Amino acid sequence: MIKIVRILLILVTIFTMAFYLPSTYRKAVEKRPMKTMIYYSEVSNDFVIARETGDSLDTQAAMRYYTPAGTQLTEEEYMRLLPFNNRRKLKLMGNMPDSLHGVALTTDVLKNVKRSMLLAPRSSEYHLYPLFESAPERLGVSLPDDLFRFTGDGIEFVDCKTGDILAEKSARFRSAMAACGFTAPARDVYGIPSVLKRWDSGYFVVDVTGGLYHLMMVKGVPFCRKIDTDIAIKNMKCHTDEEVFAHIFDTQNRLYVLTTDYTIKPLETDVCNGRFFMTSNCFARTYKTSEADSSIMYVFSPDFEPLGRYAEVVDHYSHTDEAKWEQRIFPFSVMKTPGYAHFIPLFNAPAMFWLTNLLCAILWVGLKVYHRRRLTRPENIADFVVVLLAGVYGLMAVLLYPNRK
């Protein structure tokens, strides 16, 4: 029981330090003037720029708002230009418009704002996936009793309770996929393997030849459709959306959108670092990205026709020497989504922090030798692995909750 408690304490400590230490480091070293943010106004159909005056650590710093032409806006004018971002304040002030461009701004319209981070590198990969029922009798998504995977022979379903292969179901889905031209094995599988979604749109599977296929289960029957494309797919970000199945990155970090009518549209964006923050509502879709010295926003209509592009020169912290040292010191950090709904780990490249982690492990070994502890005990081997993987976090955690043996 004591060992389990110690393990939990170490894990909680690592998580907590990964959340607080990197941000404390940034506050200590980051002293750049002015944060700069770019918005797109659905009211004026133009950009709005927010700049921070004073040092980023100065408690007296304030935001100033401008149009692209340089005209300064009051805070009230800024909020009126961005009703989706400021709907609560505008309602309290009595300044919320009833409609915009002939569209009534009902509660459903104002809440129907979608936000998503689009990343070209794939962050994680599963080997077993749940295939949900995409046309259930009741609303919602329920976990099935089996999982599927891809082998050299094609798709294969495994019973969750017994671990047995479901031969009949596997054969039915293999036959449906082969009829569409699927060639096993699968190279990549993309989807949302979670019940935390409004409905299920299945998975998108890339076969060994690079072909793209849509796989679903509809009323217990396999559904498979080949999607005509010659894109060399690097990653896909799937959505639960009435109009968009997924965003696609190719191997050159060019961005495309796959709509629910199986049309793939290239988005007219510059080839960048493969990282976009997307926001969409019923009036426009925006894609923000950053380069070494600038922030860029691309704006598209709901039908993905380009409406505009704006770039603002920004001194990004991520491209400073201080940021590089942060990546050398900390193997990863934890960020929160708005409202603390989720905590997301952001891993740095191992090439940046491996030396720090190794030094922490050597220091831990030195302390154990100094205190004449036997390094070959399972508890000490486990601590060594924790320090080697978690670096500074792991060293501090195992020292804070020491193993006395």
Image (cartoon, grey):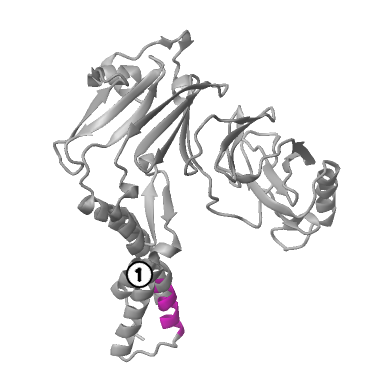
Q: Residue at x 21, y 39 (%)?
A: 33
Which sits in the foreground, 306 or 52? 306
Check disc 1 and report the residue beneath it: 356
Is residue 49 something that shows in the picture?
Answer: yes
Q: Amino acid at mark 1?
A: Thr
Tally of numbered tags: 1
364 relative to 220, above or below: below
Magenta-drawn stretch, dominant element (helix, strand or loop): helix
72 relative to 8, above or below: above
Outermost residue to the left = 60
Q: Position of residue 30 (x, y in %)?
A: 23, 49
Q: Position of residue 113 (x, y in %)?
A: 46, 27
Quick check: 388 left or right of 138?
left
Q: Residue at x 70, y 46 (%)?
A: 205
Quick check: 226 left or right of 250?
right
Q: Position of residue 114 (x, y in %)?
A: 48, 31
Quick check: 380 left or right of 148?
left
Is residue 5 something that shows in the picture?
Answer: no
Q: Position of residue 304 (x, y in %)?
A: 56, 24
Location of the N terminus (image quadrant): bottom left
Which element carries disc 1, helix, strand or loop?
helix
- Quarter of the image for residue 386 reads bottom left
The question of residue 384 being in magenta is answered with yes
163 relative to 344, above or below: below
Which sits in the foreground, 274 or 214? 274
Which sits in the foreground, 213 or 196? 213
- Quarter of the image for residue 59 reads top left
The question of residue 340 being in magenta is answered with no
Q: Which residues are magenta?
A: 378-387
